[in-house]
C-alpha cells in the first residue's frame, strides 16, 4: 500500500553540532519570505533595507508571540516542565499568536520609518504563507500535528512512539502538515493575483490573507488528532479560524473600512 514515510530523525548531526530540522525549516521559511518581500517592495518603489529593518524586529517578535500562544493555549502540557517553555526546537508554535504579534510589530516599525503601512503590507502579505508553507515541514521531521488515520495513497507513516494512545495500532495518518503547506502556497499565488488585479484598495490584501488562512486552517484543524485545549468542547484553533474567516472577510470587502494608511495620521 502506498504511503509517505516519516524521517527517522528530527535533527542533523554535523560533528559535535546538532541542528534541529524544525528550527532549520522555520529559518529557511523566514529567509525565503524576506528575500521575496524585498523583491516585491523594490518593485513598489521601496528599498530592500526597509524590509530588513522591519523583519529584524517583526520575525523574533512573531516567534515569541507564537510560542506564548502555544504555551497559553496548551499550558497543561507544561505542568512540571516549565523550563521547556523556551525550547521552540521541540515544536510548539501557535501560528495565530505569531502572526498577530509579528504583523503588529512590523506595522509599528514601518510607521516609525515613515513607510506607507498599506503599501508595505501589500508587499509583505503574500510572503507570509510562503514562510508558513516551508516551516510546516518541521512538523514532518518531528512526526507531530498529523491528522486522523487514513489509508489514502498519500497517507503519512507515523512511528509508534509518536502516535496518540487511542491510535497506537494505526500505521498511517492524514499528512496535515502537507495539506497546510500546499494550501499556503496556493494562497500566496492568489494573493499575488489579487494584488496585481488592482480591484482591492491599498491595505485590504491582508484581509484576503486572514480569510484564506482561516478557511484552510479550519478544515485542517478538524482533521487533527493531537491534544488541544477546548472551549465548549471545540478546539481553540477552530474558534480562532472562524474568527479569522469573519474578520478577514470584513476587512477585505467592507466599503466602510478605512484605509490602513489612516494609522499614519
Image: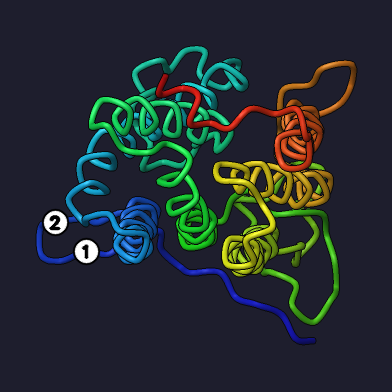
Image spot of residue 226 (x, y percent)? 71, 40
User: Image height check: is 229 above or below 205?
Assistant: above
Residue 183 appears in the picture as rendered: yes
Residue 140 is tagged as: none
Residue 158 showing in the rendered view = no
Q: Quadrant of residue 44?
A: bottom left
Closest to the observer, 218 or 20: 218
Image quarter of the C terminus: top left
What is the secondary structure assignment of the residue under circle 2?
A: strand
Residue at x-position 78% and y-position 41%: 253
Q: Residue at x 53, y 31 (%)?
A: 260
User: Which quarter of the figure has residue 218?
Assistant: top right
Instruction: Give the residue at x 35% y 32%.
Output: 87
Find out whether the residues at labels 1 and 2 contact each other: C-beta distance under 8 Å: yes
Taking 136 as reference, is 265 above or below it?
A: above
The residue tagged 2 is 17
Residue 83 image offset from top left, x and y in percent: 34, 18
Query: Which residue corresponds to mark 1?
Result: 13
* Residue 39 placement, left or right of 201: left
Amino acid at each position: 500500500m502506498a504511503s509517505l514515510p516519516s524521517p527517522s530523525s528530527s535533527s542533523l548531526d554535523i560533528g559535535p553540532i546538532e541542528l534541529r530540522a524544525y528550527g532549520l525549516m522555520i529559518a529557511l521559511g523566514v529567509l525565503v519570505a524576506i528575500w521575496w518581500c524585498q523583491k516585491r517592495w523594490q518593485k513598489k518603489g521601496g528599498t530592500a533595507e526597509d524590509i530588513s529593518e522591519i523583519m529584524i524586529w517583526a520575525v523574533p517578535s512573531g516567534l515569541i508571540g507564537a510560542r506564548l500562544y502555544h504555551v497559553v493555549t496548551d499550558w497543561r502540557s507544561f505542568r512540571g516542565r516549565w523550563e521547556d517553555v523556551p525550547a521552540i526546537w521541540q515544536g510548539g508554535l501557535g501560528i495565530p499568536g505569531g502572526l498577530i504579534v509579528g504583523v503588529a510589530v512590523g506595522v509599528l516599525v514601518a510607521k516609525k520609518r515613515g513607510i506607507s503601512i498599506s503599501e508595505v503590507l501589500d508587499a509583505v502579505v503574500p510572503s507570509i504563507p510562503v514562510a508558513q508553507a516551508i516551516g510546516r515541514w518541521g512538523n514532518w521531521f518531528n512526526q507531530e500535528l498529523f491528522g486522523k488515520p487514513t489509508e489514502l495513497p498519500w497517507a503519512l507513516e507515523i512511528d509508534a512512539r509518536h502516535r496518540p494512545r487511542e491510535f497506537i495500532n494505526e500505521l498511517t495518518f492524514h499528512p496535515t502538515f502537507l495539506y497546510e503547506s500546499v494550501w499556503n502556497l496556493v494562497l500566496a499565488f492568489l494573493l499575488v493575483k489579487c494584488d496585481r488585479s488592482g480591484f482591492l484598495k491599498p491595505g485590504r490584501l491582508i484581509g484576503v490573507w486572514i480569510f484564506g488562512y482561516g478557511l484552510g486552517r479550519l478544515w485542517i484543524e478538524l482533521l487533527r488528532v493531537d491534544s488541544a485545549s477546548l472551549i465548549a468542547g471545540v478546539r481553540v484553533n477552530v474558534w480562532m479560524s472562524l474568527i479569522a474567516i469573519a474578520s478577514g472577510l470584513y476587512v477585505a470587502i467592507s466599503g466602510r473600512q478605512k484605509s490602513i494608511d489612516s494609522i499614519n495620521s
